[in-house]
Image: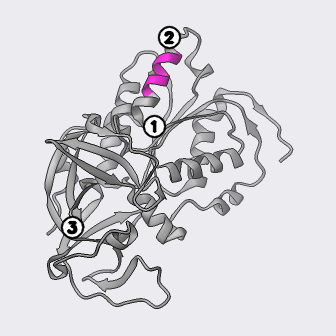
Amino acid sequence: MEMKRQTEILLESGTNEFEIMEFTIAGQTFGINVAKVRKIEMICPVKAMQKAQKDIEGVFKTRDSVITVINLASYLNLAPSENPGRDIFIITTFNNTDFAFHVHTVEGIARVSWKQIKKPDKIIYGGKEGVATGIADFDGRLITILDFEKIVSEISPDLGIQYDDLKKLGARERNDRPILLAEDSMLLSKMIVESLKRSGYENLIITDNGQEAWDYLQEAKEQGDPISDHVCCVVTDIEMPQMDGHHLTKLIKNDAVLRQLPVILFSSLINEEMWRKGEQVGADAQLTKPQIADLVTLIDDLALEKGEVKKTDR
C-alpha cells in the first residue's frame, strides 16, 4: 500500500505533531514516523545474501530497485512471528536508500503530539543502548518509537556519518563560538559531536530534543547580554520527543531576540515535501544526514563570521 504524500498528512508546518504508524513484533507495540515510510507490503520471498549480518533476511526486487530486508524481531531479540505468512514489510527511505523492515502486524496510523513522546531509558531490548528514541503514551497504551537511523547505521555503516569525509575540508582552525545541537539519537549525537570537534568546533551545547534546546535559549535570552554570546548557530534534527525541529525553528524565528540565530535542519527526513516545510518555518539551511562535511561547511558560513577564530596546532 502506497503511503499518502506528506503534504496531505501534515498540512501545517511547525505544529509539533506527527503521524505515527503502529506495528507489532511478538505482541509488543512499536511505532515509526509516517514521514519515514514509503509504503507497506505483505511479506514476499527474499533472496538470502551470503555472509550477511544475522538481522538481514536478504533482498527482494521491486519494479525499480533492490531492497534490503531487516528482521526487526531478530534485531530486538524478540520471538519470531507465530503467523509468518501474514507478516508485513514496512518500506522506508533513509539517506536516499530504501530498506524494508520485517514486522508482524501493522495496526494503523494515529496523529500525536511530540509532547506525548517521553524520553526512554538508555538501555532496553537485550542491552542495545539507545534502540528507542521515545515512548508514546497514546490512548492508554505505550508505543516504543525505535531509533531506525541507529538500526540502519549499525547494519550498513557506510550509510552513517563518515569521519573520513572531513579530510576533504583540509586544515582546520579552532572556533570557540557556541553551537547548539538538538539530536535525540544518542549514537548520531555522539557522532555529530565528534565530527564537529574534529573540525575545530569545541564549544558545543548538547540537548536531546527541541524542548531542551528551547529551554536553553530562553535561559540564555534572560541573561540580557547578546544572544550570540550563548549561541551563534543551531543545528537540529527534525524528529524528536517533546518538540520537533520544525516547531523549534518556528519558535526561534518568531522570537524578536532569537530570530537572528541561524538554524540548520540536519535530518534523514529531508526530501521535497520536508524541504518546503523547513522553508515555511524559516530554516536558514537544510541538509540530509549523513553529509557531515557539508554540515561543517554550512556552520562555517553561518556562524564563523560571528566569532573570533583562534589557531589550533592540530
Q: Which residues are magenta?
A: 214-220
Mark 2 and mark 1 residues within 8 Å of each other at the beta carbon = no
Q: Is residue 135 left or right of residue 297?
A: left
Q: Is residue 167 left or right of residue 83?
A: right
Amino acid type of the residue that numbered disc 3 sits on in the rendered structure: Lys
Which of disc 3 and disc 2 is earlier in sequence? 3
Q: Can you say whether 19 is above or below 161 in the image?
A: above
User: Which is more foreground, mark 2 or mark 1?
Assistant: 2
Q: Position of residue 219 (x, y in %)?
A: 49, 17
Q: Quadrant of the N terminus?
A: bottom left
Q: Is residue 4 left or right of residue 155?
A: left
Q: Give neighbour class at mark 3: few <14, some 14-19, many 20+ (Cα, 10 Å).
A: some
Callout 2: helix, strand or loop?
helix
Q: Which residue sits furthest right?
A: 313
Q: Which mark is residue 222?
A: 2
Q: Position of residue 261 (x, y in %)?
A: 50, 27
Which of disc 3 and disc 1 is earlier in sequence? 3
User: Which is more foreground, mark 1 or mark 3?
Assistant: 3
Question: Which residue is identified by label 1?
Answer: 284
Question: Which residue is identified by label 3?
Answer: 39
Q: Position of residue 301 (x, y in %)?
A: 60, 39
